[in-house]
Image (spheres, helix red, strand yellow):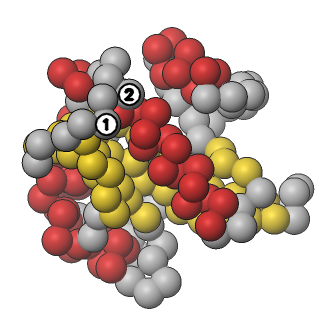
Amino acid sequence: MSNGLSIRRASGRDVATLIALCIEHAGFERIDHALRDRGDALAAALDATPAPLHAWLACFDGQAAGYATATIDFSTLDAAHFLHMDCLYVREAWRGRGIGQRLFATLQGFARSCDCAAMQWQTPDWNEDAARFYRRQGAVERSKRRFGLRLEAR
């Protein structure tokens, strides 16, 4: 399916497209988001040097079909950097065409170029399609509980 498909780094110029994809992704995962009011912060994170956020867009004949985002973090227990995949999302109409696999491979290549020892991510318990996809990529599933705590501005 590589004919017509391109994966490219996203920047602050792509915020409107990323926000649309993120809102769709949040709806799919049944989670809240604050993106409508945070476009400037998202653009700044993508364009900063060093960038705290890295993003890629999957486009098919110029139309956004999906995206992936990641950060580089440090693992105390491994004493090494790792890539934290924050998001990998392919629009429903584009699923099953290898786009997720291409985005995932792009993240793997980026992680290697940053000397990361591993990649880590999470997916909702109910998303069995994602779990199967990640297992096919060679990932090993670990059970943990994920917590979140919103911090209010002071």
**Residue 91 in picture, x, y percent from top left:** 24, 30
Which residue is label 2 attached to?
98
Per the image, label 2 sits on a secondary structure element best described as loop
Q: Residue at x 52, y 21 (%)?
A: 133
Q: Is residue 47 left or right of residue 119?
A: left
Instruction: State the residue in front, 15 or 124.
Output: 15
Looking at the image, residue 59 lies above or below residue 25: below
The reply to whether callout 1 and callout 2 are in contact (CB within 8 Å) is yes
Q: Amino acid at mark 1?
A: Ser
Q: Quadrant of residue 48?
A: bottom left
Looking at the image, residue 6 lies above or below residue 145: below
Q: Which mark is residue 2?
A: 1
Q: Earlier in the sequence, mark 1 or mark 2?
A: 1
Quadrant that contains the C terminus: bottom left
Q: Residue at x 64, y 69 (%)?
A: 114
Quadrant that contains the N terminus: top left
